[in-house]
Amino acid sequence: MSSTSASLTLFFFFFASTFLYANAFNITRILNLNNEFSTFNNLLSQTGLASTINSRQTITVLALSNDAMSIFSDQSTEDNKKSLSLHVVLDYYDIKKLKSLNKKSVILTTLFQSSGQAKGQQGFINATVMNNGDVMFGSAVRGSLLDSKLIDSVATHPYNISVLHISSYIPIMNPEGPSDHGSSSTPLPPQPPNDDDYTFDEPPSPPSSTTKPFVAAATAATAKPPSAAKANSTTSGVSAINAPDLAFAFAFVISSFWFFMTV
């Protein structure tokens, strides 16, 4: 191989590594900036969910403060993994996007749904904008209550990761309907609206073949139609990279490398 070809090959490899990792994020580092979420952060690492979150291009994490984590101390690591995976939404939602929903409610797909362990609607959560403007979360299982309130935003990197602070954990409900809503330190709001008021949201595809999902793709039996396009909220200093663009760039780099290797 000529020196020119070698130089060009090195350039393309540098371009590929810079481009592919420009929008990388680390949920552990994000949560480390606020000790209020130290217990939640530690459990994400212990259960292996932190690395799963970091492998995605688009994600929303519903984080719990230390004072809302007592339920997890009585569970096994495997049960904690299931519970916490219900708090990871496979799409980007910040406060602005949630409060500007076309409909008052949206059904969100979570990591628990993609694990293949969820039954019925267990792997979906319902986000509803109440009449007073509050955004409430709860299980999408029919009859479940919305008893987890959106408090504020912890971090946003449109349109890759959004970390939202919610008031209480979202339980994995009986797929046949709730028999026990668990305890809540705040009054329970009304139940979710009828199905006609829902908008279903499907997660975007992984950015490339190197991105590993939580366990497996969501089953076809629980697939729902996609929602409307993402809101156009922005955060200064952060840009978005769409999965198709990433795939095209990767293919371009590989083909260019192969061409110069054969010159």
Image (cartoon, rainbow, N blue to C red):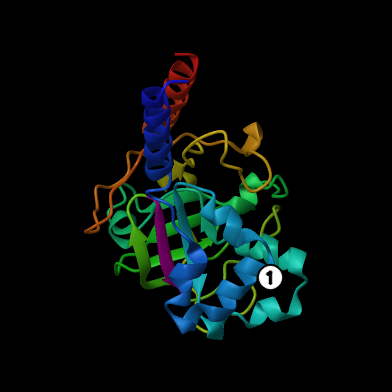
Depth check: give the residue in front, 150 or 208. Answer: 208
Image spot of residue 96 (x, y percent): 28, 59
Question: Callout 1, which amino acid?
Answer: Asp
Magenta-colored stretch includes residue 261? no
Image spot of residue 114 (x, y percent): 63, 45
Image spot of residue 229 (x, y percent): 32, 39
Quadrant location of the C terminus in the rendered image: top left
Q: Is residue 151 above or below residue 229?
A: below
User: At 57% from the left edge and 74% from the top edge, which residue is drawn?
Assistant: 40
Residues shaded magenta: 160-166
Residue on which the image places disc 1 = 180
User: At 44% from the left edge and 16% from the top edge, which residue is drawn?
Assistant: 259
Q: Is residue 222 above or below residue 233?
A: above
User: At 48% from the left edge and 49% from the top edge, which residue is drawn?
Assistant: 107
Q: Is residue 184 left or right of residue 33?
A: right
**Total tally of numbered discs in the picture:** 1
Depth check: give the residue in front, 253 or 72. Answer: 253
**Circle 1: is it few (<14), some (14-19), or many (20+) Cα within 10 Å?**
few
Magenta-colored stretch includes residue 165? yes
Depth check: give the residue in front, 88 or 124. Answer: 88
- Would residue 210 be seen by someone viewing this image from the given angle? yes
Dominant SS of magenta comes to strand
